[in-house]
């Protein structure tokens, strides 16, 4: 079973431009409690390097692109997020890394929970131990 779960959000457009809607129930498999975005990431800077015990997320590059790595402790898979209607569903207990941000990258994240520092697993060794 693949660790990479892509949600394709429909893009509706005409000669004025495009609109991409992300609605719970229909496409987002959780209630959205927090929304944030990452931008202005410097060249050769990687982010993430953590997992969450309870939090689920969907990551979408609304501009530019970045490379995501998802790891379940046994398998590592990667995917490029490079379209504003392509979302990566990140389930609980998955290590995530973000690399190769383009200069114009804006990474939007929809989260199932409010920020809670105690939900983070910030050490890969602790992550692996938790899975055993």
Image: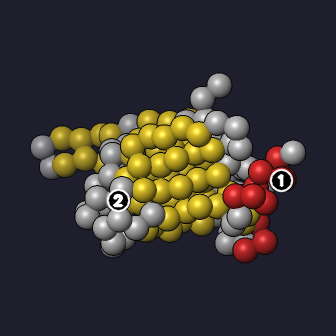
* Local secondary structure at mark 1: helix
Secondary structure, mark 2, is loop
| Label at residue 101 | 2
Q: Residues within 10 Å of mark 2 (few under 14, many from 20)?
A: many
Residue placed most toward the observer, 26 or 35:
35
The x, y position of residue 99, in whole percent, is: 42, 56
Figure check: 85 above or below 125? above
Residue 31 falls left or right of residue 68: right
Find residue 107 and report its horizontal and vertical position in percent: 41, 60
x, y percent for residue 22: 47, 48
Residue assigned mark 1: 129
Q: Residue at x 35, y 65 (%)?
A: 44
Q: Looking at the figure, which quarter contains the C terminus?
A: top right
**Depth check: 86 or 44 in front?**
44
Q: Earlier in the sequence, mark 2 or mark 1?
A: 2
Residue at the outermost top position: 1
Asked whether the residues under the numbered discs 2 and 1 touch, taking CB atoms below 8 Å apart as contact, a structural biologist would say no
Return the residue found at the far right.
132
From the image, which quarter does the N terminus lie in?
top right
């Amino acid at each position: 079973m693949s660790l990479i779960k892509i949600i394709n959000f429909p893009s509706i457009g005409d000669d004025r431009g495009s609109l991409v809607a992300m609605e719970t129930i229909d496409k987002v498999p959780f209630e959205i409690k927090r929304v944030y975005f990452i931008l202005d990431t410097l060249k050769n800077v990687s982010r993430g390097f953590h997992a969450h015990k309870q939090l689920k997320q969907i990551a979408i590059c609304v501009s530019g692109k970045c490379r995501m790595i998802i790891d379940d402790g046994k398998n590592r898979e990667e995917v490029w997020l490079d379209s504003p209607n392509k979302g990566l569903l990140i389930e609980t207990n998955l290590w995530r890394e973000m690399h190769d941000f383009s200069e114009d990258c804006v990474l939007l994240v929809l989260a199932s929970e409010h920020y809670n520092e105690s939900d983070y697993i910030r050490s890969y060794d602790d992550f692996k131990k938790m899975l055993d």
